[in-house]
Structure formats: C-alpha cells, structure tokens
Amino acid sequence: MSRKRPLTERGVRKLSAREREADLDPDDAAARWLEEHDRKPDPPQPMSTGKSKELHRWRQRRLRGE
C-alpha cells in the first residue's frame, strides 16, 4: 500500500476553499477556529495597476518615431 503524498501549496488552498464553502454551523467549534485562524484570500489585483503612464508614453513616442 502506498503512502499519501504530502499536500502541496495548491492542494492546501483548494482544501481550505472547500472547507470555507461547506456551510459549517457558525456555533461549531471548528467553524469558530477557522474564522479566527484561516486567512481570507486577498482579492485579485486589477491588471491596470501594473501598467504605468510612463510605459504608455514610451510606447507612444516609439510609435511616432521620436
């Protein structure tokens, strides 16, 4: 019989997301512990924050041939 593989970071994220979505009773000790210790994932950062105005200006100057 083979041993279970250790959890990867991705596996832990999927498992914790599944546990969060499994409607736990709010008065349950496990639900309270998860609420206190399991950090909520950060919202995804918009793509526009990685683009600077300077990059846009550089591209425009390049297209104009300056």
Image: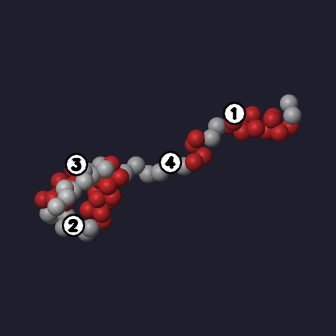
Left or right: 43 as drawn, with respect to 64: left
Residue pointed to by mark 3: 37
Residue pointed to by mark 1: 54
Residue 20 appears in the rendering? no
Local secondary structure at mark 2 = loop
Q: Which residue type carries mark 1? A: Glu
Mark closer to the chain start, 4 or 2 = 2
Local secondary structure at mark 1 = helix
CA separation in Å, label 1 and label 3:
41 Å
Left or right: 58 as drawn, with respect to 46: right
The answer to whether mark 4 and mark 2 are in CB contact below 8 A is no
Position in image of residue 44 (x %, y %): 47, 51
Q: Which residue type carries mark 3? A: His
Local secondary structure at mark 4 = loop
CA separation in Å, label 2 and label 1:
49 Å
Instruction: Judge the density around disc 3: few (<14), some (14-19), many (≥20) Cα neighbours within 10 Å.
Output: few
Mark closer to the chain start, 1 or 3 = 3
The circle drawn on residue 24 is 2
Residue name at image x 32 percent, y 55 percent:
11
Residue 8 appears in the rendering? yes
Instruction: Judge the density around disc 1: few (<14), some (14-19), many (≥20) Cα neighbours within 10 Å.
Output: few
CA separation in Å, label 4 and label 3:
23 Å
Mark closer to the chain start, 4 or 1 = 4
Q: Nearer the viewer, residue 63 or 37?
A: 63
Instruction: Judge the density around disc 4: few (<14), some (14-19), many (≥20) Cα neighbours within 10 Å.
Output: few
Residue pointed to by mark 4: 45
Q: Which residue type carries mark 4? A: Gln
Position in image of residue 8 (x %, y %): 31, 50
Quadrant of the snapshot with the C terminus: top right
Position in image of residue 61 (x %, y %): 81, 34
Q: Nearer the viewer, residue 3 or 40?
A: 3
